[in-house]
Structure formats: structure tokens, C-alpha cells
Image (cartoon, rainbow, N blue to C red):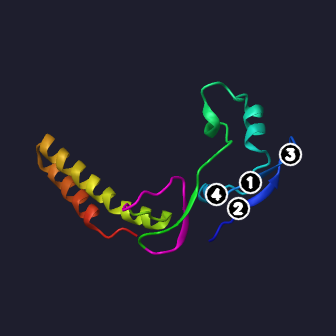
């Protein structure tokens, strides 16, 4: 699904604000059904946060850096919340999550190994063996 920046009208002040592609992706991931009704300054005023000293413009929603770039793995166009540096790969959300997925198996295996070292008895080795088999199974 491709998201494009959209212009929305604030319900409080009537001003226009941009609902960025990154924010839309966040709303989609969280399965939010409705678009935002208020601009960030009105949202802050309503919640009582306001523009306190020391919070900076980013915390008040006044500026946010989003860079359009190409995914190093699959080549699709994506947006990232930082400026990419030379020589470092930039991954889209899907490639990033698929690259991180195998680490969960390693954590389970490490936990099983720690449990087996800490404990003694047949029940520990049986549980450890089950965890190791589960960690080695292909993840869907």
C-alpha cells in the first residue's frame, strides 16, 4: 500500500496541516480507522502540554525530518525519519522487519541455554530441547 502526504483541516483552528505518509503508515500499522482531526499545536493545547520551554520544535510537532529514499534490499521507494548517511544501507519497513525476525530465535536459544546451565534435572533438559526445536523451526 502506498501512502502520499495529504492536506487536512484542523477541527479547532480551521487551519490546514499535512498528514504525512509516515504518519499514515503509523496509523495503518496501529489499525487506526480515523484520520487526525487537529493539527499538532491544537492537539498539544488540548492535552495541556502546550509549548513548554525546553521541549523543542520537534516535540511540539512543528518540524519533522522525513527523507524519501530507495530500499537497499528490494529497491522500492520508502520514507525514513532520518537523513541516510553515505555507505550505510537503508531498509524499508518490510525488509527491516524480515531482517530482524531471525534474532528472536537466537534469543529463545540463548534463554534455553541459560536455563539449562542454571538448572539441573531431566525437566530442564526436556524444556531446553523443546525451546531449541521451536527456535530452529522456520518462522511464518
Q: Give the quarter of the image for residue 73.
A: bottom left
How far, Cα to Cα, is label 2 from label 3? 19 Å
Disc 4 target residue = 31
Q: Does the magenta run of residues contain 84? A: yes
Q: Is residue 96 left or right of residue 43?
A: left
Q: Is residue 45 visible?
A: yes
* In magenta segment, residue 131: no
> Does label 3 or label 1 sit earlier along the sequence?
3
* CA distance for labels 1 and 4: 20 Å
Q: Magenta stretch: dominant SS?
A: loop
Question: Badges 3 and 1: C-beta atoms under 8 Å apart?
Answer: no
The residue indicated by pointer 3 is 11
Q: Magenta stretch?
A: 74-88
Badge nearest the viewer, 4 or 2: 2
**Label 2, on which residue?**
5
Residue at 32% over, 70% down: 138
Asked if residue 41 is positioned above or below residue 124 in the image, the reply reads: above
How packed mark 3 is, by other alpha carbons closer than 10 Å (few <14, some 14-19, many 20 or more), is few
Find residue 67 and report its image quarter: bottom right
The mark closer to the camera, 2 or 3, is 2
| N-terminal label among 1 and 2 | 2
- Residue 77: x and y, percent? 55, 71
**Which of the labelled discs sits on residue 18, or is there none?**
1
Label 2 SS: loop
Amino acid at each position: 500500500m502506498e501512502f502520499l502526504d495529504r492536506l487536512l483541516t484542523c477541527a479547532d483552528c480551521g487551519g490546514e496541516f499535512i498528514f504525512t505518509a509516515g504518519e499514515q503508515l503509523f496509523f495503518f500499522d496501529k489499525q487506526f480507522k480515523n484520520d487526525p482531526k487537529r493539527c499538532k499545536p491544537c492537539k498539544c493545547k488540548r492535552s495541556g502540554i502546550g509549548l513548554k520551554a525546553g521541549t523543542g520544535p520537534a516535540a511540539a510537532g512543528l518540524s519533522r525530518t522525513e527523507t524519501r529514499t530507495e530500499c537497499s534490499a528490494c529497491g522500492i521507494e520508502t520514507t525514513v525519519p532520518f537523513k541516510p548517511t553515505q555507505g550505510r544501507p537503508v531498509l524499508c519497513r518490510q525488509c527491516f522487519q524480515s531482517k530482524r525476525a531471525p534474532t528472536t530465535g537466537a534469543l529463545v536459544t540463548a534463554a534455553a541455554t541459560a536455563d539449562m546451565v542454571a538448572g539441573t534435572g531431566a525437566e530442564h533438559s526436556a524444556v531446553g530441547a523443546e525451546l531449541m526445536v521451536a527456535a530452529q523451526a522456520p518462522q511464518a
